[in-house]
Image: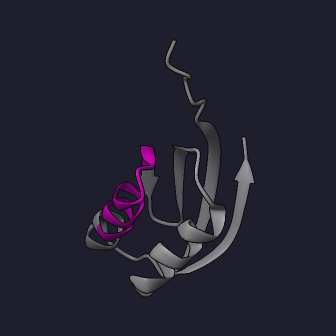
Amino acid sequence: MKEVQTLKAYQVEIQGMGCMSCVRGVTAALESLGAEVRACEIGRADIRYDGDLEAIRTAVEARGFDVTAITEM
């Protein structure tokens, strides 16, 4: 029987986003990690993810934004 991985829900607070292009960039960064992006808007993203949280910070910050908090929901 295949083991099912459970995705945890997180809210990622992000500074430096100012437009829809920023939202698309953050969404792409998160999806590249395999995160399921439930909502992304200026200042935050709600995701489901089962990987390393530091990878989220690294991917978003590589796009030029600052991750100020990652909170499990």
- Quadrant (top left/top right/bottom left/bottom right) for the C terminus: top right
Task: Depth check: give the residue in front, 57 or 42.
Answer: 57
Task: Depth check: give the residue in front, 9 or 7.
Answer: 7
- Whether residue 17 sits left or right of residue 68 in the image: it is left
Task: Depth check: give the residue in front, 27 or 23.
Answer: 27
What residue is at 45 percent from the left and 49 percent from the top? 35
Q: Which residues are magenta?
A: 25-39
User: Which residue is situated farthest in the top direction here?
Assistant: 1
The structure's colour scheme is: one colour
Could you say where residue 41 lies in the image, as x and y percent from the top left? Answer: 43, 57
Q: Is residue 24 above or below residue 1?
A: below
Task: Depth check: give the residue in front, 47 or 39.
Answer: 47
Could you say where residue 62 lies in the image, as x and y percent from the top left? Answer: 43, 84
What residue is at 64 percent from the left and 47 percent from the top? 10
What residue is at 47 percent from the left and 74 percent from the top? 60
Could you say where residue 34 lies in the image, as x and y percent from the top left? Answer: 40, 50
- Whether residue 27 sits left or right of residue 43 in the image: it is left
Q: Is residue 56 above or below residue 71?
A: below
Magenta stretch holds residue 34? yes
Q: Is residue 5 above or below residue 45?
A: above
Magenta stretch holds residue 37? yes
Could you say where residue 26 lies in the image, as x and y percent from the top left? Answer: 39, 67
User: Which residue is situated farthest in the front direction here?
Assistant: 1
The quarter holding residue 28 reads: bottom left
What residue is at 50 percent from the left and 82 percent from the top? 61
